[in-house]
Image (tube, rainbow, N blue to C red):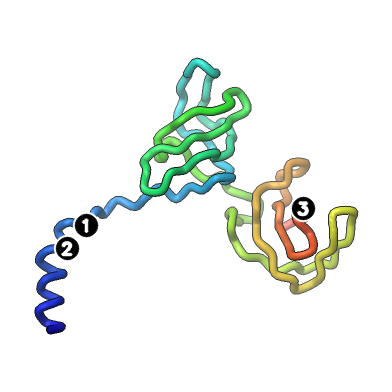
Amino acid sequence: FAQNLAGWIGNLLVPELNREMPARFHIGDNVISKIAMTNSEGTLAIGDRGTVISAPAGDTVIRCRFVNIASIQIPAEGAEHEQLAGGYGIGDVVFSKIDLTDSDGTVTIGERGTVVGSAADDRTKILCRFAQHAWASILP
């Protein structure tokens, strides 16, 4: 049976595979535009920084919000993930090396968190979410 199954998979399914990977963008991802275009809402320039607001699974387009344009649909290859300070990416798991207490919560040394973006006030910092602190701005 296993030999027949392997032959069936090899003969029928492999030629039908699509090698193209789906776009790896998610709602909330920070992106940099690699293309320039204009629509009725504004102009997008190469290098503009934006946020993904819609990324249908398996689709080749994403919808983003940029500073000069509230909503524009662009090809997925027309954007790249923003490189965050320290080489971190959105969704990376991090462990705090500091204790932090402020009006937004607390973080303790060794606590596990997730990178959620760049700090808005300081591009040398990353924004992380921890269990007791939703938006900790930390140096990488």
Name the element at disc 2. helix
Nearer to me, 85 or 23: 23
Residue 49 percent location from the top left of the image: 59, 35
Nearer to me, 49 or 66: 66
State the image quarter where residue 112 is shown.
bottom right
User: Do the residues bearing badges 1 and 2 touch, measured as CB atoms within 8 Å?
Assistant: yes
Residue tagged 2: 13
Circle number at residue 54? none
Q: Is 55 on the left-hand or right-hand side of 137?
A: left
In this rendering, the answer to whether 35 lies above or below 9 is above
Residue 63 percent location from the top left of the image: 49, 35
Residue positioned most to the top? 40
Image quadrant where one finds the N terminus: bottom left
Residue tagged 3: 137
User: Do the residues bearing badges 3 and 1 touch, measured as CB atoms within 8 Å?
Assistant: no
**Who comes first in sequence, dot 3 or dot 1?**
1
Residue 77 percent location from the top left of the image: 40, 39
Tell me which amino acid carries mark 3.
Ser
Residue tagged 1: 17
User: Do the residues bearing badges 3 and 2 touch, measured as CB atoms within 8 Å?
Assistant: no
Circle 3 or circle 2, nearest the eye:
2
Q: Is 80 on the left-hand or right-hand side of 61?
A: right
Q: Residue at x 58, y 30 (%)?
A: 66
Q: Would residue 113 be seen by someone viewing this image from the given angle?
A: yes
Circle 3 or circle 1, nearest the eye:
1
Q: Residue at x 74, y 65 (%)?
A: 131
Tell me which amino acid carries mark 1.
Leu
The answer for how far apart the CA atoms under marks 3 and 1 are is 43 Å
Q: Would residue 138 be seen by someone viewing this image from the given angle?
A: no
Name the element at disc 1. loop
The answer for how far apart the CA atoms under marks 3 and 2 are is 48 Å
Q: Residue at x 50, y 28 (%)?
A: 72
